[in-house]
Image: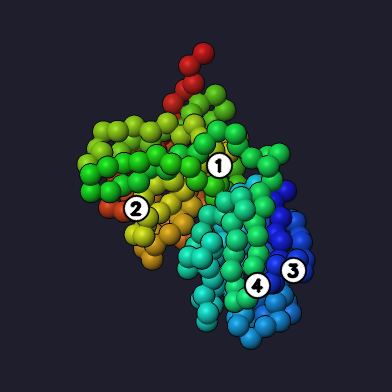
Amino acid sequence: MPRLILSMDGLVLKEMPLERERTTIGRKPHNDIQIDNLAISGEHAAIVTILNDAFLEDLNSTNGTYVNGQPVKKHVLQNNDVVELGKYRIKFVADQAGAQSEQDEAVVFGSTTAGVSGEAPAPSGLPAANAAPVGSIGMIQILSGTHAGRTLELSKSLTTLGKPGTQVAVITRRPHGYFITHVEGTVFPVVNGHPLDAQAHRLNDHDIIEIAGVKMEFFSQALQA
């Protein structure tokens, strides 16, 4: 189970497992992690956790939320990431026993190239009746842009799609299907003409997804015997 380690000036103040789906951080007493300091907003940030996947969201705090020195609004948490809230530090420690040994995939839509890199998981949702069934694998076919015609096999635990700084979403693979979640950008991805909200959305065969101006189709394909 992932856990958080709260410290200030190198002194560990608290350590807690991420047992809840949503963990709130802020100055007000009702927060799961209360930090009684004026530099911290009443409701400063939240961490959403499902299984071993977690992502951090700044709740429009006054002084902002930083991860490894960089300001963030939404951030997929990776093992040993350090969340900075004023003088306080919260270290995210992933569950190494449940971590994927294989590297997850990221497809970056740029003007000329598409890259592959490692990413940490993001939250998923509930099982979908019409999602990719057992014995099949999810696929994405890019329909527009520079990489039109390219087909991606969603065999990794997580695939990141989009353009960093503009719009990013993640597709997580679960035993009962595939789920897409918005991660970065003010404009949310579109599925079948409808913008997503902040929650994970289950994908069904032949869903049309639009991310960072690129259209793609999700479908499932039977695994080879």
- What kind of residue is marked 1? Ala
Instruction: Give residue 214's position: percent from left, percent from top.
Output: 28, 48
Q: Nearer the viewer, mark 1 or mark 4?
A: 4
Q: Nearer the viewer, residue 43 or 179?
A: 43
Q: Nearer the viewer, mark 3 or mark 2?
A: 3
Q: Secondary structure at mark 2?
A: strand
Is 215 situated left or right of 122 in this image? left
Which residue is depicted at the point 48% across and 65% down?
Answer: 70
Going from the N terminus, do you reach mark 3 or mark 1 first? 3
Instruction: Give residue 133's position: percent from left, percent from top.
Output: 54, 30
Which residue is depicted at the point 76% across and 60% down?
Answer: 16
Residue assigned mark 3: 11
The local crowd at label 3, few if under 14, some if 14 to 19, many if 20 or more residues have their Cα within 10 Å, is few
Going from the N terminus, do you reach mark 3 or mark 2 first? 3
Which residue appears farthest toward the front when viewing the image? 10
Q: Which mark is residue 163?
A: 2
Mark 2 and mark 4: span between their CA atoms?
A: 31 Å
Q: Which mark is residue 128?
A: 1
Q: Nearer the viewer, mark 2 or mark 1?
A: 2
- What kind of residue is marked 3? Leu
Is 186 situated left or right of 136 in this image? left
Residue 200 in sight from this viewpoint: yes
Q: Nearer the viewer, mark 2 or mark 4?
A: 4
Residue assigned mark 4: 88
Instruction: Give residue 172's position: percent from left, percent from top.
Output: 52, 43
Mark 3 and mark 4: span between their CA atoms?
A: 10 Å
Total number of numbered discs in the rendering: 4
